[in-house]
Amino acid sequence: MMDGLDDNTVILSDENRKPGRSETVDLTDNSLLVDISDALSEKDKVKFTVHTKTTLPEFQKSEFLVVRQHEEFVWLHDRFEEIEEYAGYIIPPAPPRPDFDASREKLQKLGEGEGTMTKEEFNKMKQELEAEYLATFKKTVAMHEVFLCRLANHPVFRNDHNFRVFLEYDQDLCVRGKNKMEVLGGFMKSFTKTTDEFLLSATVKDVNDFFEQEKNFLIDYHLHLKDATAKGDKMTKRHKDVADSYIKISTGLVQLSSIDNSDLEKFLAKVAETFEKACKIEGRVASDEDLKLSDTLRYYMRDSFAAKRLLYRRLRCLANYENANRNLERARTKNKDVHAAELAQQQACEKFEQMSDKGKEELMDFKTRRVAAFRKNLVDLAELEIKHSKAQVQLLKNCLAALKEE
Amino acid sequence: MADSRDPPPLFNNVDIDQRDYDNEDLFTSAVEDIGVHEDGASETPKLQLSQESPSLDNVQVVKSPPALQGEPLDELEKECGDQFIQVTVTEPQKLGEGMAAYVAYKVITRTNMPIFRKRSFSVMRRFSDFLGLHDKLVEKYLRMGRIIPPAPEKSVIGMTKIKMSNQPEQGSSAEFVEKRRASLERYLNRTAAHPILGIDPDFREFLEADMELPKATNTSALSGAGVMRLFNKVGETVNKITYKMDESDPEQQWFEEKTQQIENLDTQLRKLHANVETLVLHRKDLAVLTSAFAKSAAMLSNCEEHTSLSRALSQLAEVEEKVEALHNEQANADFSVLCELLKDYIALTVAIKEVFHERVKVYQNWQHSQQMLNKKREQKAKLELSGKPDKGNQASVEVVEWEAKVERGQEEFDNISKMIKKEMERFEVSRVKDFKAIIIQYLENLMTHQQQLIKYWEAFLPEAKAIA
């Protein structure tokens, strides 16, 4: 189980993956393979084609496709959150909503500014924006896929009834009522507020040091991850802006070259070409930074939040347990309903201990996962930065050699 | 003093009267205050006149001294090939207090040109001195058809920063001073590189004279001379008759073509300049955001409980800080190398447009003289027919005068046309050279930064791999 979860989170950041090819982790376990084989972007929504291949008998067929939208993924996540039995697990965070607003805005601005630039410039910028749009698209597909894969590879979650419905039921799951979502969304928000407050103000002193430590660590860590993610995002966005301004400079140089009838004509044309290529490289740097750095931070921000939720549920469970204890004492003093109280207390105790055990495992696993993911992504990041910088150096060297020859 | 009987020439600043040329150096200002015509050499600075006028005395005044025209000019230019002069502007110092505060710069010249008294020397100059120098050069040479390198712009905001700030060494006023210093340096070197302007007496005095130059009050926006200039400019455009130039003349076509080219160049340069400015802004912003990220990563590293991951994260924070410094350097290079080059050339295209405009003015002047001549001839003919010998004589005299003016007008026009062509050739050559050199420098700079980036990330890679 641990391996499965490990490598699944690593899939997120695999640069070479095509949207739709899920890597199996544990080569011997093909019992439930889920991937997103196709995705369609339509105005406001994205439609994901979820493809399942399975040998499990619980499913009606061995291979099938359904079309799902983002809201349905969120619905699935929320179902997991609600189920008591899963309280001791870290529920994989739901994928973020597909956000093409930024791309769309840029595309619109480009359309408005069409009159002010040359045809070439317009085409180049359009290409860039389309590439950006495609990249965002691929990313959202990957995130939705990872969510499903984590569930599919989890020994307990994969058997969940709602999960099966999600994968199999070929009609729309009627979760698209916006008002419902808004209500749920509002509920969730207030939920998240109280989680932290609860955790922080827990007067219920945790017996177990491990959990006390984890609580303090996770609260802090989550905050820092949030901060780092936000700053990372801003940084990569600005990096993209730098890359984009290279295009404008390139077209400017082309125009300058075209009105020139001296040596400078060829010279400037070559420099313009170089700037165009440099733009592509810088663009790659920005998007790789986004993928390896920002996305990793973002994913673990959300995962650490899921871990916090686990702690919250456990504390609530502990509160229940303590209540049950008190009830039992009261029952004993009054000598009334003792047996019922005993039973209740026993149940509460079992539940709590189960949760604690499970919870500890999950948190250890979280750590391992996290460390592995960071390692892989930081290594990838460094390697890519080096690769791109070397490419730029080569590009510039060639350009300079060509320019100095003339 | 202009002949008061004739309607004044269309352009106040052209003194067609032969008398003054006899006394004065050709290089004295064509733009003269109306009261000064008769005084001759009064207000121009001390040194140069005494040196040049002996050679001028017996020369037909409209022709420039032989040493500075036609083939001999080329020789002079060739000579300059072995000669070298380099000017640096350094050590800006804030002097004075409050609203009277200003910045003085040290101007250091290194040269092997024999015309200078020493091989290396330095003086202190303030910004208005530079502007004053430029004005003098314009006065002397614009009419001849020279392209005068433009001086850096005045900046009210910049100067207010200087006057207001207590610590001129830091912050935005320091940035402003640095930008100005660099642009003053480029200005002087460009002027020094010109074969004629570089040895001009006013220029030499600017570089050499180890004393404060008389305050160039004419350069301040609201001075009397400034207002006069404004009036003159306005007056020039309100012509009663504009004489159209002969467009079938291939010469004229060359000028039309060039004018269009310069117009195009100006437009494209401005666009490119705006784009590079955007790049600079984005990059500077990127540096700031990278730094913010680095700090965040450092905090994350402190919080992280896994030791080797924590170490790797703190290394990441360090790398990002180094990257930030690189981004800043690159942005500064973007600006000071590329952006300023473009701005200088935009200003140069403006200077070129000015000189083309001068030529138009000279032409107008010439045509006006021609008109007057025709009128005078008619008058003379009429008077002779009507048999009034006295007035007839007077008319003859006037005809002769205007014939001379027409001749001079035509020569002036021919000369300015020739000179502009020469200057344009020179401009083209130096433009190509400048752009090539500076763009190559910029690209090399870009490459160095990328190489530095490689080093930083290569140093980080083993740290990342060491996470266990």
Image (cartoon, rainbow, N blue to C red):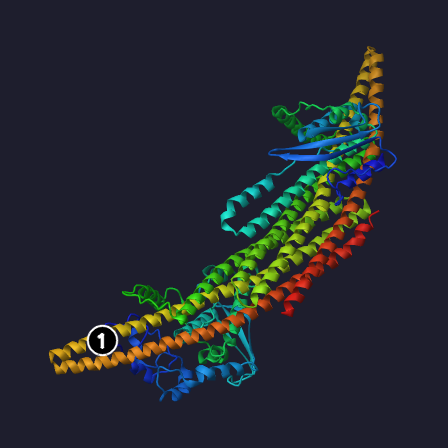
In the rendered image, the vertical position of residue A362 relative to residue B31, given as above or below? above
Q: Is residue B335 left or right of residue B263?
A: right
Q: Considering the image in quadrants, where does the N terminus of chain B appear? A: bottom left
Which residue ends up furthest to the top in the rendered image? A336
Q: In the image shown, does A324 or B133 lie closer to the viewer?
A: B133
In the rendered image, residue A160, in percent from the top left (x then y), is placed at 79, 25
Q: Which chain letter matches label 1?
A: B
Q: Is residue B44 left or right of residue B327?
A: left
Q: Identify the residue at horizontal 76%, vertical 34% (top origin).
A: A35
Which residue ends up furthest to the right in the rendered image? A28
For label 1, the SS is loop
In the rendered image, the vertical position of residue A47 relative to residue A388, given as above or below? above
Report if residue B313 is visible in the image: no
Q: How many marks?
A: 1
Q: Identify the residue at horizontal 65%, vertical 69% (top origin).
A: A405
In the rendered image, residue A167, in percent from the top left (x then y), is placed at 75, 27
In the rendered image, the vertical position of residue B151 relative to residue B331, given as above or below? below
Which residue ends up furthest to the front in the rendered image? B248
Q: Identify the residue at horizontal 78%, vertical 34% (top origin).
A: A149
Of the residues shown, which amino acid type is indicated by label 1? Ser
Near mark 1 (Cα within 10 A), the count class, few <14, some 14-19 or many ≥20, is: few
Q: Which residue is mark 1?
A: B4
In the rendered image, residue B416, in percent from the top left (x then y), is placed at 40, 75
Image quadrant assignment for residue A257: bottom right
Report if residue B290 is visible in the image: yes
In the rendered image, residue A402, in percent from the top left (x then y), is placed at 65, 66
